[in-house]
Amino acid sequence: MKLSKDWLEFFKDDDFQQDLVFLSIISLIYFFNLIEKSSFDMLMSIIIAGDAVKKLGRGKQ
């Protein structure tokens, strides 16, 4: 039961929802060949790493 509550909190997180929107937009742009694979990889990495840094920073406050 605790695991399901943790997942629900994860999906309710505003940062996660914003990142999901950005990841979806970038995926669509890549799908329509508007950016190269290397740019796609870099943008995805930046978004995911940025979210990790935000979460780590919150733990130290």
Image (cartoon, helix red, strand yellow):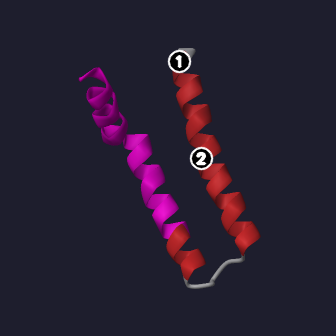
Across and down, in percent, residue 19 comes to: 48, 51
Which residues, given as a range, are shown in magenta? 1-26
- Alpha carbons under labels 1 and 2: distance apart: 17 Å
Q: Quadrant location of residue 5?
A: top left
Asked whether, in this view, residue 57 is left or right of residue 4, the answer is right
Extreme top residue here?
A: 61
| Residue 26 versus residue 32 in the image, above or below | above
Q: Which residue is mark 2?
A: 48
Whether the magenta-drawn stretch holds residue 23 is answered as yes
Amino acid beneath label 2: Ile
User: Judging from the image, what secondary structure is the residue with disc 2 in?
Assistant: helix
Across and down, in percent, residue 10 comes to: 37, 36
Marks 1,2: beta carbons within 8 A: no
Across and down, in percent, residue 48 comes to: 59, 46
Q: Which residue is mark 1?
A: 59
**Callout 2 crowding tier (Cα within 10 Å): few <14, some 14–19, many ≥20:** some
